[in-house]
Amino acid sequence: MKKTVSQAIKDRRSVRVFKDSKIKSNKVKECIHNATLAPNSSNLQLWEFIHVNDPVYLNKLSKACMNQSAAKTASQIVVVVTRKNLWRKRAKKNIEFLTKQYKENSITTKRYKLALKYYSKLIPILYFDFLGILGVFKYLMFQIIGLFMPVVRQTLNSDLRIVAHKSAGLAAQNFMISMSEIGYDTCPMEGFDSLIVKKTLKLPRGSEINMVIGCGEREEKGVYGPQFRVPFEMVYKYI
């Protein structure tokens, strides 16, 4: 019986020990495709997903993850990477898509011009920087504008890094819920040496590791006890 979204969410657990069995790469790839459908800032999609099935690379990544069991016993590993440095290419892709839609009369002239201005003018203002200097200038400029109207105030390079990681986190959750839906298990790991992971996967300088996710089928001992969450009333505010 196919799981509902709520069932997949509830069944998902961070599995620390996986069975010594193989999972299907094509199924994992389909779940990664679902990850790419996640909402993300400005639809820039500043992410990449490295799907690792090669035993040599799995062993190297396990060592980079301090040989924790969730990595050491994983059948496959998915590394979620942020690529803030690709903002120009991603903005260009959006413009190409919008232009195609406009030529096919799928969007109005007004919407097309607004979107074109957004990707060709505003995105470069937000993302272009030089040694962090322009970021500080933009930050001060937006704080002044904010005295008169609501504005986006998080314009520093560090702020935009957070934006990219938030989007990648949403994608990672899509992936893990999709894996749960088909009966596969995952464990998102933050205990890793990011420099070794980048070197192992030959990732470019502008990339950052958002998450390393072990994948497989859970051992009974792989889930460390019942799930605990603080009382809902502690985190829920209704206005």
Image: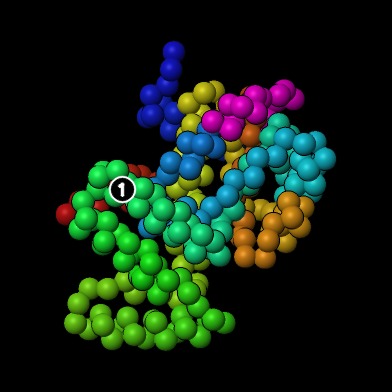
- Residue 96 in view of the camera: yes
- Identify which residue, 117 or 68, lies in the foreground: 117
Direction from residue 41 to residue 69 in the image, left or right = right
Q: Residue furthest left?
A: 239
Identify which amino acid the numbered label 1 is placed on: Lys
Q: Residue at x 77, y 36 (%)?
A: 54
Residue 3 at x, y percent in the picture? 42, 21
Magenta span has 71? no
User: In the figure, is residue 49 to the left or right of 52?
Assistant: left
Q: Is residue 226 visible?
A: no
Q: Nearer the viewer, residue 238 or 129?
A: 129
Above or below, 41 relative to 58: below
Where, by quadrant of the figure, is residue 148 drawn? bottom left
* Residue at image coords 65%, 40%: 51
The location of residue 187, given as percent across then percent down, is: 60, 39
Left of 122 or right of it: where is 1?
right
Magenta segment includes 27: yes
Residue occupying image coordinates x 46% and y 68%: 160
Front one among 106 and 61:
106
Relative image position of residue 159 (x, y in whole percent): 45, 70
Q: Which residue is mark 1?
A: 103
Q: Residues within 10 Å of mark 1 (few under 14, many from 20)?
A: few
Q: What range is drawn magenta here?
A: 16-30
The answer to which image quadrant residue 105 occupies is: top left
Q: Split into 4 quadrants, where in the image is the C terminus? A: bottom left
What residue sits 42% from the left and 44% below the top?
A: 38
Residue 145 found in image quarter: bottom left
